[in-house]
Image: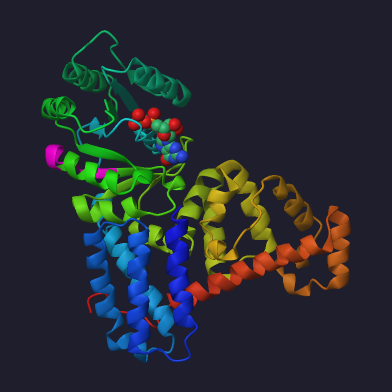
Amino acid sequence: MFATLHDKLNAVFKKIKGQAKITEDNIKDAVKQVRLALLEADVNYKVVKKFISAVQEKALGEEVLKSLTPDQVFIKIVHDELVNVLGGDDQSTKIKLNPIPPTKIMLVGLQGSGKTTTAGKLAKYFQKNGKDVLLVADDIYRPAAIDQLEILGKQLKVDVFSKRDEQDAVKIAKEAVQHAKSAAKDVVIIDTAGRLHIDETLMEELKNIKEAINPDEILFVADAMTGQDAVNVAKTFNEMLDITGVILTKLDGDARGGAALSIREVTGKPLKFVGTGEKLDAFEPFYPDRMASRILGMGDIVTLVEMAQDAIEEDEAEKLATKIQKKGLDFNDMLQQMKMIKKMGSFESILKLLPGFSGLGNIDVDESNFKRIEAIINSMTPLERTNYKILNASRKRRIAKGSGTSVSEVNKLIQQLQQMNKMMKKFKKQFSGKDKIDKNM
Ligand code: GDP
């Protein structure tokens, strides 16, 4: 996710850090490099312009030059601007449930954008929050789309409303809402038809559905990998339907991030969720600040803990979060996390939420490696697990022998833990307020 943008921005930060003395010219150059990074990431040029002028104004203010840690203040400025462009602290990123159920959600977008998969993901999201959901297959053109939704419904044990012989999408939507009311459903999610391109007939149909059922949310589903095309299509859908928000899919495959960084600014509508994989639980509510931290490689402890909460007991998760943030990681945390990870999904996606992970270069995320790491930690004494500093040569040899691995593998694991803690400390310091910039400046 956003690997290219992350690498480019970090190269800029590294360069600033390398300067013996920071001058106005250095800052100007860094701002120029950030601009290039954004353009290369396929961010809409108007968005880049606004972004850069905000960064430039703040960065050339005295705060950066006067600061003892100008590079970190600069990163903070870029971070804050990323949060801004992604939506700030806008509360409309959340879905408000209608006090009179069912809450009606209409999903719209082009074919292949991930609409049907997203309908399933959204159903699962509400289901996890204790809501009774009805999925509606409202694509009268492609029977395969109905099949797909029915399969998802079976998988999730969620009811699916469909009418294969009906040729009127408006009628299906109306009947579905009626059915949801009589079945006392909390949420009804309507998966509408998509086309490969914007098409007037389809737009007309969507407008008529909107008029007939008066949805609480019209969410535009966009494929992040299509970059500015997704942004342009979102703009048209918004003009035609006055959408209430955007769901960006396939963020897992999006190295550049152009759509994610432009869509909010161009449409004026909030990003509400993101899809991060093909599986039904690869789906997250969207939080601008967390995403900005991920783009910059600062990790996203909050999302990590939330994912963990699904896998472990709640107070266990809270304890872990507090401990990681206060004291740093030890081998017990690593082991505990690996156990959770097995329940939570892919190793790589979770590691990326840890601060500093992306700064580690190529960690071997082969899941078979898991077993070796587990064996190494299991061969440590309780004291060694909580204090890796006591691991001398003879202890390392014993651990390697006990786990059937090698001393160099043990060393590698220790280094990884050290590195993660180092990065975490760094980011903690950076955001501890010492060099805090007033956002209203
Ligand atoms: P629709 O035509 O808009 O209904 O799109 P589908 O739901 O059928 O999705 C099209 C393809 O995108 C399928 O192969 C999905 O598995 C895939 N897909 C959907 N969302 C995501 C996502 O967040 N990440 C990845 N990697 N693939 C996704």
The C terminus - image quarter: bottom left
Which one is nearer the viewer's eye here, 259 or 159?
A: 259
Residue pictured at 21% horizontal, 17% vertical: 172
Residue 245 magenta:
yes
Query: Going by the image, does 68 lie left or right of 220?
Result: right
Image quadrant of ligand 1 equals top left
In the image, residue 312 above or below residue 205 = below
Q: Which of 32 and 110 is in front in this view?
A: 32
Image point (83%, 63%), residue name: 407
The picture places residue 280, in percent across and down from the top left corner, at: 46, 35
Region in magenta: 239-246
Residue 424 to residue 169: above or below? below
Residue 256 percent location from the top left of the image:
40, 54
Of residue 218 and residue 363, the one placed in the foreground of this image is: 363
The answer to whether residue 389 of the structure is visible from this angle is: yes
- In this rendered view, identify the residue nearer to me: 48 or 215: 48
**Residue 213: horizontal and vertical position, in percent?**
15, 27
Question: In which image quadrant can residue 331 be found?
Answer: bottom right
Residue at left offset 89%, top offset 58%: 401
For residue 341: magenta?
Answer: no
Left or right of 20, for residue 215: left
